Image: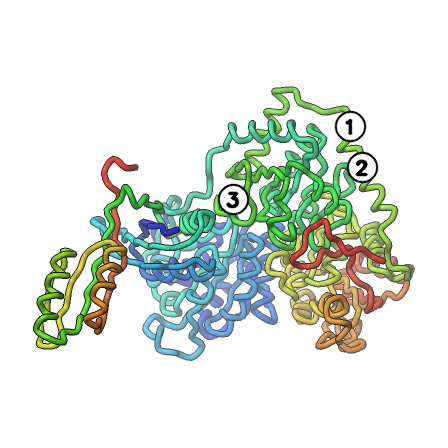
Amino acid sequence: MWAILSILVENKPGILFKVTHLFRARDFNIDSISVGVTENPEYSKMTITTYGDEKQIDQIVKQLDKMIDTVRVERLDEHKTVYRELSIFKIKLSNANDSMEVNKLANAYGGKVHDVKQDSVMVELTATPDQIKAFEELAKPFGIIDVARTGVAALQRSGAE
Amino acid sequence: MSNMENMIGAKALMTAMEKEGVKEVFGLPGGANLPMYDEFARCNIRHILTRHEQSAAHMADGFGRVSRKPGVCFATSGPGATNILTGIATAQADSAPMVAVTGQVPTAMIGKDAFQESDIIGMANPVVKYAFQPRHASEIPEVVRKGFFIAETGRPGPVLIDIPKDVQQNEAEMTFPDEFKIQGYHPWTDPDIVAVEKAIDMLLHSQKPVILAGGGTIISSAFAELQSIAEALMLPVVTTFKGKGAFPENHPLSLGPIGMHGHAEANKIMSEADCVLAIGTRFSDRSVGTFEEFERNLKIIHMDVDPAEIGKNQTAQLAVVGDVQTNLRIMVKLLLQKAIKKTEETPWVKHVKETKAYWEENLKLHPGEMGAAKILRKLREILPKESIITTEVGQHQMWASLFYDVIQPGTFFSSTGLGTMGWGFPASIGAKVAKPDVPVVDIAGDGSFAMTENSLATAVLEDIPVIVFVLNNFTLGMVAQWQRTFYDRRMIGVDQGKYCPDYVKLAESYGAQGIRAQSMDELDKAIRDALSSDVATVIDIPIDPEEDVLPFVAPGTSLKDMILPS
């Protein structure tokens, strides 16, 4: 089971280390992680996506909650949450036709094209991890030179609490 | 806010600790904590010098468990700090309140691989309840206030305060706060009356209910509540090893500890039960055997102060989260209100008592004069009931669990979670400092005692007359037992040598009293001599190296599958 956790922490040095250390020590998985300061500079928000069975995810939430540096830990329901990840793909262009095809593919996924060169192009894509995976599959035949992904950022929809 | 004053960080540390009521610090000085040590010349805190930082931490741990206030230990940076790690991890595993204060290299040197620099904050992270590293002297008063608060509230645990040397030396305007805020820390929850009512209902509607009392029962001193509930509902009481002595072990409803080396009657009755009121326990593998087998056909009511323990190892049908004593008090009150008081012995209680009587009669013991059971029963017979016991880790520890009955609740302490050999002796010194008026005995084995025996220097020079009761089989006995049982008697790395050292001479070389007891008469006299001695005493009791601890629930099996003496 895949789960999105939203963790509000005090914005102090060393807390990312403690959170990731907890996952390692308790043998939990981190699928992706993103961290950023909130509108109130006293706090940062971490979004962690993880895999596990119901019991494990329940334990992860409880153990995170127990940490003194965490202010609020929420497990977000993905159907009631806006969640996105930013990814940048560098894709190989072998011929003139490739350039057009990659452009079309990027458009279909709402991606933006950057750094267009003779033999490569970059596509910036903000989407759900599933959509990014689907895009990656379709881009593979062209040849993926490099990928960078940010991890998921997520906010619960209004009225979904 | 009060008491604005200019002073250096080290003085602020000592002043803040005095405000917390600290009277003793166990520790060892070094380059990076010299400013703190210099303050001992100007404050009312007694310094107790140890011979190793690990022992300082164990002393603080023993002090903390007995006094229920954080014990304090000091160590310098680098190796001093890494040496206390085992002590901190031991306290964390057993939820003992402790504040460890380490010196650190000056702020400007951090990260430069300076002499005696270690990233102790990073290393200690998984084994502390919380860690602080103040970077400005002015932070120290609040850090100390918060550190003590975190260490002793909720589920207690060790707190590390790592102070760079320049932060100790710098002068600042200090404010000693009465109030403070820790946003993400909620040690208290409201009592859960609805859940407690449900728990009573579940216990009344089951045929074979038991109470399983864990270490949390002792930490929250819920002895009286536990006893009145057990008596009102006529519930047999088993304990975990850490919960040993939460309930008087001479009580007719007491069955003693369950687990790998639990009492036969306790394991038997626990396996037959259909409903358990589990109080302040984390269901460790050593207590319950295999998790799946333990919870089969068993309704679990789980009371614990730590919500993360609910559902971690066992699935609870009902959770009662919060301070155990508070919730048990509510249960006592509800039972009184509803006038629930069982007087008629149920078939279950009758069966429990028969089972207990059977095993008391029929458990085969070592036939020799100096068998473990006889030795520990002799100790029990002579010691006053308020005496405090600590143990080391190994066979002697499990024999103590089996054969030394705790009469006064909360007088038995052991390294149960981490299983740290060498814990018992320094912990007994800490315990004696916390309660100087009661006899304190470390039940030890020769292997464990060897690990921290140099604490004899502390016991003698600091005038802390504890008793070390060494069941000496000249062997790492528990490992030897496993090698006999599981490795076809291939005895590797367990021979400790005959009298190497001679513990009588060793004790005497430190200025302590050393007595060898080779018969029951000698043992009787040795215990009485030790009790009346002004100096620490080591009683060396040679025993049969082949004696096993039985019953034994082999790892990965269930409580039903006890190996019994043949």
Q: Tell me what residue is drawn at x 69 percent, y 33 percent.
A: B230
Q: Which chain is home to disc 3?
A: B
The coloring applied to the image is: rainbow
Q: Image quadrant of residue B515? A: bottom right
User: Is label 3 in contact with label 2 (beta carbons under 8 Å)?
Assistant: no
Foreground of the two, B521 or B340: B340
Instruction: Where is residue B356? Give x, y as percent.
Output: 81, 42
**Residue receiving disc 2:** B353
What is the number of the mark on residue B293?
A: none
- Horizontal side of B188 relative to B441 (left or right) equals left
Mark nearer the N terminus (3 vs 1)? 3
* Res. B406 visible in picture: yes
Q: CA distance from mark 1 to mark 2?
A: 10 Å
What is the number of the mark on residue B310?
A: 3
Q: Which chain is home to disc 2?
A: B
Type of amino acid under label 1:
Glu
Q: Secondary structure at mark 2?
A: helix
Q: Tell me what residue is drawn at x 58 percent, y 54 percent.
A: B94
Q: Tell me what residue is drawn at x 72 percent, y 25 percent.
A: B342
**Residue receiving disc 1:** B345
Instruction: Where is residue B121? Give x, y as percent.
Output: 42, 65
Instruction: Where is residue B341? Give x, y as percent.
Output: 70, 24
Instruction: Where is residue A30? Give x, y as percent.
Output: 37, 59
Q: CA distance from mark 3 to mark 2?
A: 31 Å
Type of amino acid under label 2:
Lys
User: Is label 1 in contact with label 2 (beta carbons under 8 Å)?
Assistant: yes
Position of B169 relative to B258 (above/below): below
Q: Tell me what residue is drawn at x 82 percent, y 68 percent.
A: B546
Mark nearer the N terminus (1 vs 2)? 1
Foreground of the two, B245 or B553: B553
